[in-house]
Each structure stands twice: as structure tokens, then as C-alpha cells.
Amino acid sequence: MNQPQHLLILAVDQRPWLTQALHGHTGTATRGQRAAIADGKHMVVEGLLAALADEPRLAAHAGILVDATLGPGVAERAHANGVTVSMPLERGGCEIYETEPADLRSHLEHHGPELPKVLVRYNVEGDVDGNRVQRARLAEVSATVRDAGGRFLFELLVPPTPAQLDAVGGDLGRFERELRPALVHRAMTELLDEVPVDVWKLEHLDRQEHYRTAARIAAGAGGECILLGANAPAARVEGWLADAAAAGFTGFAIGRSIWWDALRGLLAGDLARPQAVAAVAANYRGFAAAFLAAVPVGPEPHE
């Protein structure tokens, strides 16, 4: 029997967030800042490769999500080592999706990512006109990605509207538990009317039944779902992974929960590079083990 294929992606495509976290701004990084961040992202891919050397069974599933702006050369190193590459196509920090770079076809041809990715903020009860604009733009991007031979990875974030937040007494945790799962399902259904999606990258959905519904919606259009980590503590992420895997999700795309402490320590001079690489490798192996241990034997739950 063939080994089931999963997507176990290490995400290190942060751009405005990373310059803000490290240097206190979201503007254009200086040359020195860019060089330091790029070195940190290369350390992260070294950690991924170290994890695969330690656990060869993960090689068939491993991926990295990385940008070319602050991570030049990382995608090339990953490709050279047989790692699936995902790259972002959105302009960072926008409320309404904008494609970046402008010449998308040339970008895809040059870098050859297997999983070009967009990050989109989309609430079906939010900005109607903005949602319409986003669907039109995303339909074009999806077509371009598929024409280039890639699979379209869609990271869906559902921020609360003011009315939704009021309905849960301003409690963001209640919104995430009580309202967001259904909003995610509705957004997926609405988007799929116009935008073909191969892989959905979703926030945690609180209960297995909600993950199972998302997996069914995706599978009904020939797609699959993976879980994002949201920079949560490891124990919490492992709980989400167990529920998602049991309900038919096919993997994860986890970033800061894996590498943030190691990258910050490296750039601050508090960690030697071998220590930082080892920490990234250990964290990645831990999340991979937590996910794979929860994958059911036999048909997926949405089949």
C-alpha cells in the first residue's frame, strides 16, 4: 500500500510582521535588516533539513512556505533538497487582497513553487463590495497558478465584524469557538463558486465536527485542508492538530510556533547557529509526529 501523502509545511513567509517584531516597523527594511532576516530564514530551512535527516519518513511530506523578498535563496535550497515549495502571492498587510508581484506569470516561471499561496481576510457578513473585488482578483490568480502547473493554496482568515464581536460580548475567544467555524464554512462555499482552490489553509475550528465539515467542503471541489498554527503554544497547537488530522485534514502549515524563539535568539546573539537549527528541527518533528499519530487508518472521514 502506498504511503498516504500529507503536507507538513514549515511557514516562514512573514514579511511586515517580522520586520515589526524584530525592528519595530513595517516599512522597507534596511540592507542590514534584510541581510539578518534572510540569514534567519536560511537557518529555518537548515532546521527543516536537519529534521528530515533525523526522520527520513517525513521527507515525502515536507514543505516550506517562504518569500523571495526577505528569504532570497531559501526556496532554491529547499527545491535542491526535494522539499515542496510554497510562496506567497499577496501584498503583505492588506485588508483587501492585492497580488504581489505584479508580473505573476514571470514570478511563477522563475521560482517554480508547487503551491503558490494567497492570504485572504474574508468574512461573508463583512464588506460586501470588498468581498466581490477579492473574489474577482482571486479567480484570476487561481487561473494563473493552475496554468503555470501549480496547486493553489488559499489561507483563509475570518476576522470578526464589529457586530459579531458585540454578539459575543467582545470576547475574541468566544468568537473563535462559537461563530468562526460556521463563517469559515460559509466563506469556503461562497468562494468556491468563483475561485478554484486546491489546498485550504485554515485557522483552528474548535471541534472535530467543524474540521470534518471543512474537509468535506474542500473535497467536494477536489481540494483538501491543512491547519495553520497561529503562533499558539505548542501544546495547544498539538491539540488542534490531533482534532484536524482525525477529521480528515491532510497536514499543516506552522510557522512561528516552530521557529520564532530560535530565530530571535540567533539574531540577538543568544543562540549559536547549531542550537537554533536543532531547536527548529525538534519543533518541526514534534508537530509532524503529533499530526501523523492522529491520522486515522483507512478511508478519510469525509469520504
Image (cartoon, grey):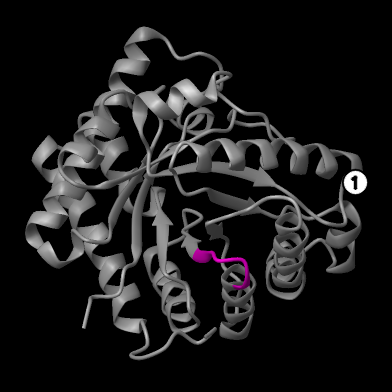
Q: Residue furthest front?
A: 147
Q: Is residue 134 left or right of residue 263?
A: right
Query: What span is in magenta?
Result: 220-225
Q: Quadrant of residue 73?
A: top left
Indicate the position of residue 131 as horizontal and vertical percent values: 82, 44
- Residue carrying label 1: 128
SS under mark 1? helix
Of the pair 211 and 17, the residue shown nearer to us? 211
Q: How many dots with numbers?
A: 1
- Is 66 drawn above or below residue 103 in the view shown? below
- Is 295 drawn above or below residue 159 in the view shown? below
Residue 222 within the segment the image draws in magenta: yes
Q: Residues within 10 Å of mark 1 (few under 14, many from 20)?
A: few
Give, as a three-letter code, the residue at label 1: Val
Indicate the position of residue 295 as horizontal and vertical percent values: 36, 82
- Is 179 drawn above or below residue 270 in the view shown? below
Of the pair 218 and 209, the residue shown nearer to us? 218
- Residue at 83% x, 56% y: name it: 124
- Is 52 drawn above or below residue 213 in the view shown? above
Note whether residue 64 is visible.
yes
Indicate the position of residue 208 as horizontal and vertical percent values: 56, 84
Residue 152 within the segment the image draws in magenta: no
- Residue at 24% x, 31% y: name it: 76
- Residue at 64% x, 72% y: name it: 217
Indicate the position of residue 280 as horizontal and vertical percent values: 23, 50
